[in-house]
Structure formats: structure tokens, C-alpha cells
């Protein structure tokens, strides 16, 4: 099937060649073009021999020679990702309320998205042709949701229509030089404790091309009616999980196992130094964010102080999630020590919308901010940008302009890693 062209950039090479939007790309230089990944890999050559399918369905051949000063100018139609067909007991999407943004209910389980965007996949929907493509094009690294090396336990948790032997598949990928990052979503009573110990033992002694292993606690919202009963992590379970990880890291002299920040917070343990996280391979999984944010604050402190002092006579309130409360409280105290005529405090926004067990900034809603944020007169709110999506909307569908209207003063938006900030 042809890859349809969504648009052609004016004055580009494709525009000069007379290619129109809606045209299908069948092949480039004799290679079939299935999706945007094929297109990106194949369109980088100097000479591009296209086989196109015109709007009338007829095929035609066309050659384009790349020029350094001109773009090719082809934008393919949006990629239709492959959906997840599992029924995992811990699926976060299954426990979200209705009427949120439509994109939040999309369950992708797509190896192309895994490679390009770092999305985690289960490997339960791959065909023989998918594996051939992965091997041939060296689609690596992949991001894989493992959960357990025990096939029966994994199936009990994932309830897949196409269960796999996880270790066998990992070994097959390794034989073709495909490396991977792994994720284990830890669910009390299922794959924690001895089961977690066994999984880590299996993978750490396997000598497979594993780049990192992220251990994250199950996230449970208050919308679990009709779903199986699960337990949330508490301090005792978090401590036990961290002790197992510490033991396995030491026993196998391996530093590629990384617990989620939330486990350290729940356990009341200090966040490790930056060396613990190496090059932060699981940062997109929320692992190591608190350490990186703390280090970035120290590096950016002078610049931040200059920004705060620019609003003479104004005080500030850092609105944060429960999981970041410790770090944000320390930052507020340090800023107060350095600011002479202004003050900074922090307020935790608890997640009443999704439930008490949800504690990350990215899931803070407009509704909870509207109900909980209490600012003093003349106080400026500082908010994490992670509460907004790329289009500027909160989880519950409010635009940042509507959120701004909640506050009398200007807003200071700060990215969660404290690398940059801006006024709104």
C-alpha cells in the first residue's frame, strides 16, 4: 500500500518535480515505502528514484536529485500506529475517567513508535514480517515492557491473546544485534518481592544487550470500578523493592537497574547522586528527574534569581505535585535565603481528580488547581509545564489561557527539569 503525501512544501524539490498532495509513494530506489520510518531512511540518498501512484491510481516513475540548499519538501500523512490488544491488569488507560482528551485513550503498542519515540511495547503483536523488518533495518534500540521473565506470571498480568516466552524473544532479538531498554511495572502481590528478584536475576545474568531496566510502581487511580482489585505501593513495599534492586545491582555488579523516583519518595530515602543514573537512559520514564532537576537548579540558580527579582516587590508560590514536594520545598527555602526583599513558598496540589495514589506533576489537572491553589495578594504562581500537552491543554481539557485566568498575576512556567522558564 502506498504512503500518501499530506503536503508539499512550495519551492521545494518535490514541488518543482510536480508531485501533488495525495500522491502515494510506492517505492524509493527499489525499496518499498511502508511508513514514515521507511521514507526517512530511504529519502536521504543523493538520487531518489520514485515509483509514485497518482491521484487517478496510475503509477509513474520520477527521479529527484538532492540539492544541499533545497529541501525535498514531502510531508507524509500521519502514521496510524498499531494498537495494544492486551488486557493488562494495571493498564492506566483503563482507569481513566471519561471525557478527557481523545488522545489519552489511545493504546499504542507499535514497534516503530518504540524506536522513534521511546514508547514501550509488549512484543505480543509482532508478526514474522515485523521481525524480519526489525532485523533487516536494525530497528534498535527498542523499548520493551517486560514485567516478568516468567511467561506464566507475565500472561497473568497482561492477559494477552498472543502470549510469548519473554526471555526467548529477547534472546532472538539479541542474536540479530537488536538492543533494548526494559521496563517492569511492579504490582504488589504479583511481580514484586521474590518475583522481582527472580526477574532481575534472569536478565542480569543473561548477558543480553540490555541498555537499562526501569522499575516503576503501578499507578492506581480512583476509577477502578469493574477492574480487578490491586494494591498500591506504600513505604514498606517501596523499601523492600529498593532493597531488592540494591542487592541485585551489587550481586551482579550491574548499574543498569534504575528504580522510579516515586519509590525513593515513598520509602523516605534520599534521591541518589547523578552518577547513579549514568546518562539517564530512563529519564522519559520519569526515572532520575528529581536528581536532574536538583542539579539543574544549582546550575541555573543565578539566572532564576534574576528572573524572580525582575518582578520587584512580588512574592512567589511554587505549585507542585506531591512526589516533587521535598525537592521543591528545598528549592523554595534556598531561594528565600538568597532573596532579600521577596519570598518564595511552595504548595502541594494533591490529585483529587485521579486519586490519592497519583502524585506526579504531569497528571495535575485544571480542576485540582482551581480548587486547591491558594495565592496571597500580589503573589505570582510558578507552574510546571508538564501539566500541559504540546497544544497547551491540561489533562482535563482546559487551555493554558483558561488556566492563566485563575490567577490575578502573571504566571511563570518552568519546565520540570528546571532547564528553562518563561512568563505567560
Image (cartoon, grey):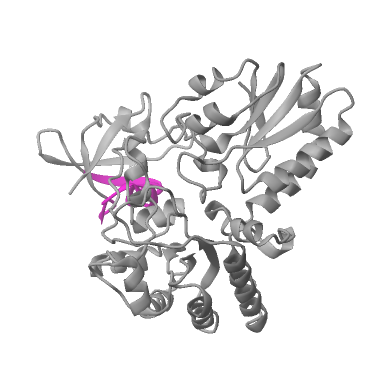
Residue 90, horizontal then vertical, whole percent? 39, 60
* Residue 49 is inside the magenta segment: yes
Left or right: residue 144 compared with residue 406: left
Using the image as rendered, state which of residue 267 and residue 67 is in the foreground.
267
- Depicted 307 relative to depicted 61: above or below: above
Left or right: residue 59 compared with residue 195: left
Asked if one can make out residue 135 in the rendered structure from this viewpoint, the answer is yes
The residue shown at (52%, 38%) is 364
Left or right: residue 402 compared with residue 47: right
The residue shown at (36%, 27%) is 9
- Depicted 355 relative to depicted 371: above or below: below
Using the image as rendered, state which of residue 239 and residue 6 is in the foreground.
239
Where is the C terminus found, in terms of image quarters?
top right
| Residue 147 picture quarter | bottom left
Start and end of the magenta stretch? Answer: 28-51
Residue 334, horizontal then vertical, whole percent? 83, 39
Residue 264, horizontal then vertical, whole percent? 65, 60
Asked if one can make out residue 256 in the rendered structure from this viewpoint, the answer is no
Residue 62, horizontal then vertical, whole percent? 24, 40
The residue shown at (61%, 67%) is 236
Left or right: residue 227 compared with residue 201: left
- Depicted 302 relative to depicted 400: above or below: below
Using the image as rendered, state which of residue 44 and residue 316 is in the foreground.
316
The residue shown at (28%, 72%) is 163
| Residue 89 picture quarter | bottom left
- Depicted 202 relative to depicted 49: above or below: below
Amino acid at each position: 500500500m502506498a504512503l500518501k503525501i499530506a503536503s508539499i512544501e512550495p519551492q521545494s524539490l518535490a514541488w518543482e518535480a510536480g508531485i501533488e498532495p495525495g500522491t502515494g509513494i510506492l517505492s524509493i530506489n527499489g525499496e518499498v515505502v511502508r511508513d514514515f520510518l521507511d521514507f526517512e531512511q530511504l529519502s536521504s540518498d543523493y538520487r531518489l528514484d520514485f515509483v509514485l501512484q497518482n491521484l487517478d491510481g496510475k503509477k509513474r516513475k520520477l527521479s529527484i536529485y538532492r540539492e544541499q540548499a533545497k529541501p525535498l519538501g514531502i510531508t507524509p500523512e500521519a502514521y496510524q500506529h498499531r494498537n495494544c490488544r492486551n488486557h493488562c491488569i494495571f493498564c492506566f488507560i483503563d482507569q481513566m475517567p471519561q471525557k478527557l482528551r481523545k488522545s489519552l485513550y489511545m493504546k499504542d503498542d507499535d514497534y516503530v513508535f518504540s524506536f522513534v519515540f521511546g514508547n514501550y511495547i509488549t512484543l505480543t503483536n509482532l508478526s514474522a514480517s515485523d521481525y524480519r523488518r526489525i532485523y533487516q533495518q536494525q530497528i534498535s534500540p527498542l523499548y520493551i515492557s517486560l514485567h516478568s521473565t516468567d511467561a506464566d506470571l507475565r500472561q497473568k498480568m497482561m492477559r494477552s491473546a498472543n502470549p510469548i516466552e519473554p526471555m526467548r524473544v529477547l534472546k532472538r532479538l539479541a542474536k540479530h544485534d537488536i538492543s533494548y531498554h526494559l521496563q517492569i511495572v511492579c504490582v504488589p502481590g504479583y511481580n514484586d518481592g521474590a518475583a522481582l528478584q527472580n526477574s532481575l536475576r534472569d536478565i542480569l545474568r543473561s548477558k543480553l544487550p540490555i541498555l537499562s531496566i526501569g522499575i516503576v510502581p503501578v499507578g492506581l487511580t480512583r476509577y477502578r470500578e469493574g477492574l480487578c482489585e490491586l494494591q498500591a505501593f506504600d513505604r514498606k513495599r517501596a523499601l523492600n523493592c529498593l532493597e531488592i534492586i540494591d542487592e541485585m545491582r551489587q550481586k551482579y555488579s550491574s548499574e543498569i537497574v534504575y528504580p522510579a523516583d516515586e519509590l525513593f519518595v515513598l520509602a523516605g530515602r534520599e534521591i541518589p547522586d547523578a552518577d547513579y543514573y549514568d546518562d539517564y537512559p530512563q529519564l522519559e520514564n520519569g526515572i532520575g528527574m528529581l536528581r536532574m532537576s536538583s542539579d539543574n537548579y544549582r546550575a541555573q540558580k543565578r539566572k532564576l534569581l534574576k528572573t524572580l527579582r525582575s518582578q520587584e516587590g512580588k512574592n512567589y508560590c511554587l505549585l507542585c505535585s506531591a512526589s516533587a514536594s521535598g525537592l521543591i520545598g528545598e528549592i523554595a527555602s534556598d531561594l528565600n535565603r538568597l532573596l532579600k526583599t521577596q519570598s518564595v513558598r511552595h504548595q502541594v496540589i494533591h490529585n483529587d481528580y485521579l486519586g490519592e495514589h497519583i502524585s506526579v506533576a504531569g497528571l495535575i489537572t485544571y480542576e485540582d488547581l482551581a480548587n486547591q491553589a491558594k495565592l496571597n495578594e500580589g503573589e505570582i504562581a510558578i507552574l510546571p509545564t508538564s501539566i500541559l500537552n504540546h497544544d497547551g491543554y491540561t489533562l482535563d481539557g482546559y487551555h493554558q489561557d483558561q488556566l492563566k485566568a485563575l490567577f490575578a498575576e502573571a504566571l511563570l512556567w518552568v519546565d520540570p527539569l528546571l532547564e528553562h522558564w518563561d512568563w505567560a
